[in-house]
Amino acid sequence: MPSPAQFEERIRRNIRELEIAGLRRKLQPPAGIDLSSNDYLGLSSHPLLKQKMAEAVLELGCGSTGSRLLRGERAAFAAVEKRFAAFKKTAASLCFGSGFTANIGVLGTFIERHDVVFTDSRNHASIVDGIRLSRAKRVKFRHCDTDDLARRLRSNSNGPGTSQKFLVTESLFSMDGDFAPLADYAQLCRETGTVLIVDEAHAVGVYGLSGSGWIEETNSGGEVFVSVDPAGKALGVAGAFVSGPEWAVEYLIQRARPFMFSTAPPPSLAAALDASLTLIEQEPERRRRVQELAGFLRGLLGEQGANIGRSQSQIIPVMLGENDRVKFVATELEREGFDVRAIRPPAVPEGTARLRVSVNALLDETTLQRFATTLRKVTSCSVVSS
């Protein structure tokens, strides 16, 4: 049996291997112009959100003191869940502590061992882990490839008994900045009896006529079973909503372990989320602005020959390939006053290390022009130095 010293050495060896591979990460607080966060609408520091959260802390306290099935339930949670369901045009919604726990809760609860799950090859880690917990058969299809998905759906029968097919996808992919073809997926699911689950993490608040997400933008809501909508990105706060039929939400309350056995979020979170929904409703110019700025920057980067993949959104990957090169470029950009982070495996496939540039509504064209010019200079230096 290994001794405690041998165990420590094993862990230290693993860390050294990460360092050698250029994959060791460091915690780094924000510094410089924000081109890396998910605060797409710039709401995280909005005075109204801060005011409502502070007022709620003074009224309701800092903590919820227990799970929602114990003493953690508050009227504020029920109220914001009702409002969010109306926002998503669903019958009900349920608030979780984070997007990760929401995905694990949804996938680990509704999907059973004898089911079959079709999952995009680039789905988020929380989706991957949720499917693993379900112990169902997992079938990966090529990223956003409708034809590949259709072949796999039609070649996999539901099997005996009550076996069910599920399709799980992000609507806007967090590292590539491209969109799932949800309208096509909805039709396929209708034709094959497949249940569609959509993670709207990076689309909610930014897309759709009302800002509710890519489901609304593509008019796919009629075929979506539930959506998972994390609130720590464009909504500027924290937590996540799961929205769908009343019976589905009721089942999550009864069976979703991350909901049942987690302390409820602070009640003040609900107050801030309510304020965020008010701003999204009253200030549609924020989402229009972030889309305009994203298109402007994609154009600049395309003109200078940067490889931005298939990005169509406010998430713009700058593909650099090598781990050491992307670290060098990110460090040099930081010195120039831009906060852009290096993204390396396992967050992205091997050989696709990149800068993940994210655009928010508080930026302007002059800043983005300066960033594009600096990026071109820095990337040229990285080629010479390597």
Image (spheres, grey):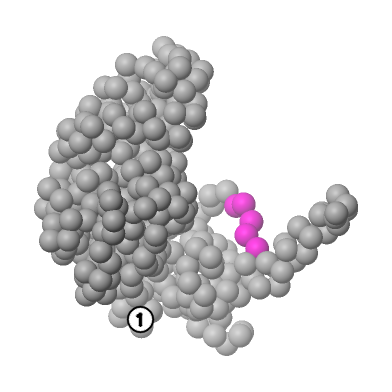
In the depicted structure, whether residue 27 falls above or below residue 338: above
Q: Can residue 74 be seen at all in this image of the molecule?
A: yes
Corner quadrant of residue 178: bottom left
Q: Can residue 87 be seen at all in this image of the molecule?
A: no
For label 1, the SS is: loop
The one of 171 and 192 positioned closer to us in this rendering: 192
Quarter of the image for the N terminus: give it: bottom right
In-image side of 58 versus 240 (left or right) = right
Magenta segment: does it hold 27? yes
In-image side of 163 versus 281 (left or right) = right
Q: Residue at the location (29% across, 56% down)?
A: 160
According to the picture, the residue beneath numbered tag 1 turns out to be 304
Residue 241 on image: x %, y %: 32, 37
The one of 49 and 266 positioned closer to us in this rendering: 266
The one of 32 and 228 positioned closer to us in this rendering: 228
Q: Residue at the location (11% across, 53% down)?
A: 219
Corner quadrant of residue 381: bottom right
Magenta stretch: dominant secondary structure? loop
Quarter of the image for the C terminus: give it: bottom right
Residue 114 on image: x %, y %: 37, 53
Residue 168 on image: x %, y %: 31, 56
Q: Which residues are magenta?
A: 24-28
In-image side of 340 versus 95 (left or right) = right
Magenta segment: does it hold 378? no
